Image (spheres, grey):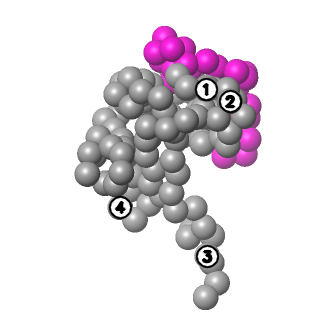
Amino acid sequence: MSFQPDDFTVWMELPVTDLDKSIDFYNEVFQTELNKIVDMGPNPVAMFPAKKDGVAGHLYPGTPPAKGTGPTIHLLCPDTLEATMDRLAKAGGEVVSDPIAIPDGRFTYCLDLDGNSIGLFSR
């Protein structure tokens, strides 16, 4: 069996120190509703919205890596990059780069409340 490009990434997880506070942060920044699930395993998780059969992910209570040292998860902005950057900063996150243009759009590097590296991406 060989991997197809669409099959390579299947899941992402971000450890957070305060699940409820982080749910509020991500809901505010991305104008969405993460779903808190308490019976998925040893800990409650908050699921990111995903397309049917699309890449999924969640927040979970855990120990984040040192500020800005973990992998970067890139998330799609619900509107403009600048509006999402503003909401992130107002919600307590940190924008750490100017917008960067790439062929498919623009993105910026940021840190969430726990110092997890996230990229805000806009097409």
Task: Please name the amino acid that badge 1 sits on.
Answer: Gly
Characterize the local packing of mark 4: few (<14), some (14-19) or many (20 or more) Cα atoms within 10 angstroms.
few
> What stretch of residues is rendered in magenta?
84-109
- 91 displayed left or right of 114: left
Q: Earlier in the sequence, mark 4 or mark 2?
A: 4
Task: Please name the amino acid that badge 2 sits on.
Answer: Ala
Mark closer to the observer (3, 2)? 2
Task: Please name the amino acid that badge 3 sits on.
Answer: Gln
Q: Nearer the viewer, residue 22 or 38?
A: 38
Residue that carries the numbered disc 3 in the rendered image: 4
Which of the 4 quarters of the picture holds residue 36?
top left
Please indicate, yes or no, whether residue 122 appears anywhere in the rendered image: no
Q: Nearer the viewer, residue 35 or 54?
A: 35
Q: CA distance from mark 3 to mark 1?
A: 32 Å
Characterize the local packing of mark 3: few (<14), some (14-19) or many (20 or more) Cα atoms within 10 angstroms.
few
Q: Earlier in the sequence, mark 3 or mark 2?
A: 3
Give the quadrant of the C terminus: top right
Q: CA distance from mark 3 to mark 2?
A: 33 Å
Marks 1,2: beta carbons within 8 A = yes
| Label 4 element class | loop
Residue that carries the numbered disc 4 in the rendered image: 52
Please indicate, yes or no, whether residue 89 appears anywhere in the rendered image: yes
Q: CA distance from mark 3 to mark 4?
A: 18 Å
Which mark, by number, is residue 79? none
Characterize the local packing of mark 1: few (<14), some (14-19) or many (20 or more) Cα atoms within 10 angstroms.
some
Residue that carries the numbered disc 2 in the rendered image: 66
Residue that carries the numbered disc 1 in the rendered image: 115
Mark closer to the observer (1, 4)? 1
- 2 displayed left or right of 89: right
| Label 1 element class | loop
Q: Earlier in the sequence, mark 1 or mark 2?
A: 2
